[in-house]
Amino acid sequence: MISKKEVSEALAKISLPGQGSNIIDDKTVTNLVCFGDEVVVDLKLNTPSHHIRHRLETDIKKTLEAQFGSSLSLQINAKVEVPDKPEIKGKAIPGIQNIIAVASGKGGVGKSTVTANLAVSLAKMGFSVGVLDADIYGPSIPIMFDVALERPLAVDINGRSLMKPVENYGVKILSIGFFTQPNQAVIWRGPMAAKALNQMIFDAHWGALDFLLIDLPPGTGDIHLSIMQSLPVTGAVVVSTPQNVALADARKGVAMFQQESINVPVLGIVENMSYFTPAELPDNKYYIFGQSGAKNLADDLEIPFLGELPLVQSVREAGDAGRPAALQTDTAVSKSFENLTKNIVQELVIRNKELPPSEAVKITTMAGCAAVKK
């Protein structure tokens, strides 16, 4: 005879990803029925994620079979109760359907390159796309779109003078780089940088967009909080390279978005510079920075792996020339970006179908420390 107490004690060893308490204490397990060698476990989940549900059911099965034997007759009933869609707080931008933050834990992993090529790929698919370059201290989007010398014009919209984003390759762009000289360093404290970002967000005439991509600066800091305070970000994409030093920071980037007080869905991880393919040996792959590091991290964190991008000279040359590699047709590189874009759109469709809209977070200061609240 298997007792309810024994089953409960066994299940108390299991926790959901990101949860501090076990599934007994946090009421994920709503009911237990034990009869002979038969056990029925009723679960209540507040996320429709198939990854989390499958992982939890597997952990329960392994834990109970390890304690009571493989002859155990186990039935798991999982019920998903997603909270009602909340009223979106913050200042949503009229006409913009989806806001995707592209982030990285550290610099130099190709986040801006991924953003630029993702924007171009979306535009090629027929979507209306905008890019906000939120990397205040190192804006590179204007160079990658060959618009470094352009300046936004002023347009009158309903009596308000607004900035008209610069446009190239079918993508609307705003960046602090349009308002500074190439050799001018931006030496601003956080509040001034946040004010500049808010002007580019809300004092601009973006028009109707299917996607607004936000190229965030590296790390997890003040600019990130300012963006998430200002806008209800639909989802986040984290870019990393395969080596451990980059993956450690990518893990922190994912953790930032998954914090309960921020709660921005992570659409997945992109592995950039996955392998080197020389032009003279197009069929060869050399894993300079390690193999499948970002994929393994995605599996470990139970979030989607969106795809890998090669380290090839043409991507660098295209970015320097202001003509993103995704503009090319029928090349291995353009197909990699196309597949990546399709995977992101697919995850976004799932996110919008199964989860409520994101909320802009409220940031307060308590006892001299920054506290983040819903």
Image (cartoon, helix red, strand yellow):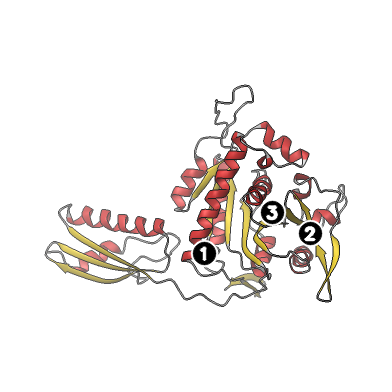
Along the viewing direction, whichever of 251 and 198 lies nearer the viewer: 198
Q: Is residue 20 left or right of residue 98?
A: left
Which percent across, then down, holds residue 239?
59, 48
Which percent across, then down, holds residue 37?
13, 61
The secondary structure type at the circle numbered 2 is: loop
Along the viewing direction, whichever of 59 and 353 lies nearer the viewer: 353
Q: In which quarter of the image is the C terminus?
A: bottom right
Along the viewing direction, whichever of 69 and 95 lies nearer the viewer: 95
User: Is 293 placed above or below 14 here?
Assistant: above
Of the two numbered discs 1 and 2 on the same chain, state the one appearing first in sequence: 2
User: Which tag is nearer the camera, tag 3 or tag 1?
Assistant: 1
**Which residue sits furthest front?**
126
Of the two numbered discs 3 and 2 on the same chain, state the one appearing first in sequence: 2
From where the camera sits, is residue 188 visible? yes
Circle 1 is placed at which residue position? 352
Quadrant in the picture for residue 235: bottom right
Circle 2 is placed at which residue position? 165
Of the numbered discs in the image, which one, if any, rests on residue 217? 3
**Kind of residue at badge 3:** Pro
Q: Is residue 344 left or right of residue 324?
A: left
